[in-house]
């Protein structure tokens, strides 16, 4: 004999209510639970790295305020992106929060993730070196996220990279008020001057999946060495105005990597004056000239290798030879042919490296830079 339909419905409803009551009882905190208060700290107090000048229009600009109206407008505008900037800190927190604000509302590019363009990238120092831990994926111009949680208790050093292709208004780190957070110790036993990289969109970070995957950042972690990233997308052209600014810095090494943005005539006219200006300001600092990477379609595209690569590389090599014959010391050269490997898998779009391409590029750079840095220690 079937139960009346209304009795079946009442029984089902009572079952649902009973289950929900049990779940609610489990989910509710006990009377002994104390809400955790988050202590927020502006990362400026820990020492933001990657800033070549302190007299900037906004704190996270990469060129000084006086450069506005002196360098071309595209260079100035790109200098307001925080590429290469980072902060190191020590904390025993098991949960790390972050909040940050961006100057641009457009969070991603056609060939670049929102995390790479506008996000944060967190590393932790281990016995084996730096290891990736977490990313801050942006959703809006102003973001607040739980960056890492349930960390094994312990006091550790962390490294947080800032957005590559967006301007940064502020970044704050949040930890429990019961934990400590403080600036990290110096990179080495003594003060280490930064490696200054000057270049193009590739150096600025296109198309790294996240800020820590640019070759300059990889080299920073490999050598435990400060870096300054002066990559200007489409606008690394070795112009005299930019050369004047570069000469103001006090680096361990200059790495000049502008060929992707230049044609043969520009290379012929600008390389030697740039190098001589840097040498006049810094008689003993190593200067490294870098050839262009090979466009990955050049093997099958008529004329691309001859026109776009061979002519440019020949002009750079000629300038290098002239400088050496004139007695220029501490001048070094990185060929471009193997910067991305030889299997065609090192780019996102045939031009800009993916993470594999950046890793390969860092390995080529390291062979030249490592012995130069050893002499600096």
Image (spheres, helix red, strand yellow):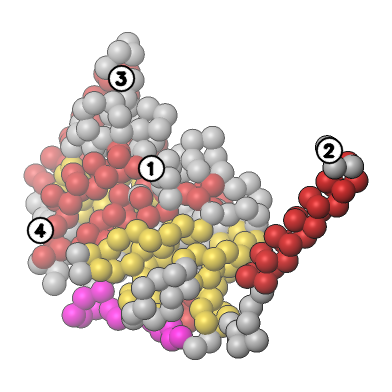
Between the residue at mark 2 and the residue at mark 1, the CA separation in whole angstroms equals: 74 Å
How many numbered callouts?
A: 4
Badge 1 marks a residue whose secondary structure is: helix
Which comes sooner in the sequence, label 4 or label 2?
Answer: 2
Q: Nearer the viewer, residue 158 or 316?
A: 158
Q: What numbered label is drawn on residue 2?
A: 2
Q: What numbered label is drawn on residue 202?
A: 1
Which comes sooner in the sequence, label 2 or label 1?
Answer: 2
Which comes sooner in the sequence, label 2 or label 3?
Answer: 2
Which comes sooner in the sequence, label 1 or label 3?
Answer: 1
Q: Residue 302's spot in the image, x, y percent? A: 32, 11
Q: Which residue is mark 4?
A: 371
Task: State the extent of the magenta-drawn residues as a range.
Answer: 179-191
Q: Residue 60's spot in the image, x, y percent? A: 52, 65
Q: What numbered label is drawn on residue 298?
A: 3
- When asked about the image quadrant of residue 35, the answer is bottom right
Above or below residue 173? Residue 353 is above
Which comes sooner in the sequence, label 4 or label 1?
Answer: 1
The crowd level at tag 3 (other Cα within 10 Å; few <14, some 14-19, many 20+) is: some
């Amino acid at each position: 004999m079937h139960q009346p339909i209304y009795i079946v419905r009442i029984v089902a409803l009572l079952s649902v209510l009973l289950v929900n009551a049990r779940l609610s009882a489990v989910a509710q905190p006990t009377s002994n639970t104390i809400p955790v208060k988050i202590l927020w700290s502006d990362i400026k107090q820990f020492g933001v790295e990657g800033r070549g000048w302190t007299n900037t229009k906004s704190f996270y600009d990469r060129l000084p305020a006086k450069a506005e109206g002196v360098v071309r407008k595209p260079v100035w505008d790109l200098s307001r992106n925080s590429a290469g900037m980072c902060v190191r800190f020590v904390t025993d927190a098991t949960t790390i929060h972050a909040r940050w604000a961006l100057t641009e509302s457009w969070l991603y590019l056609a060939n670049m993730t929102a995390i790479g363009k506008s996000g944060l990238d967190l590393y932790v120092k281990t016995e084996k070196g730096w290891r990736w831990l977490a990313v801050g994926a942006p959703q809006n111009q102003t973001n607040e996220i739980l960056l890492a949680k349930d960390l094994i208790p312990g006091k550790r050093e962390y490294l947080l990279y800032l957005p590559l292709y967006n301007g940064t208004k502020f970044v704050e780190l949040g930890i429990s008020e019961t934990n400590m957070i403080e600036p990290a110790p110096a990179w080495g036993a003594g003060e280490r001057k930064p490696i200054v990289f000057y270049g193009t969109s590739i150096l600025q970070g296109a198309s790294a999946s996240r800020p820590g995957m640019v070759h300059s950042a990889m080299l920073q972690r490999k050598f435990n060495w400060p870096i300054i990233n002066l990559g200007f997308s489409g606008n690394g052209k070795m112009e005299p105005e930019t050369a004047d600014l570069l000469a103001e810095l006090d680096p361990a090494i200059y790495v000049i990597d502008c060929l992707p943005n230049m044609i043969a005539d520009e290379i012929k006219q600008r390389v030697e004056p740039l190098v001589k200006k840097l040498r006049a300001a810094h008689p003993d600092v190593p200067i490294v000239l870098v050839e262009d990477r090979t466009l990955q379609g050049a093997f099958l595209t008529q004329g691309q290798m001859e026109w776009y690569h061979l002519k440019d590389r020949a002009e750079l090599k000629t300038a290098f030879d002239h400088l050496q014959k004139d007695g220029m010391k501490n001048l070094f050269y990185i060929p471009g042919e193997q910067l991305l490997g030889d299997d065609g898998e090192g780019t996102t779009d045939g031009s800009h490296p993916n993470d594999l391409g950046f890793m390969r590029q860092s390995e080529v750079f390291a062979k030249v830079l490592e012995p130069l840095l050893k002499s600096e220690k």
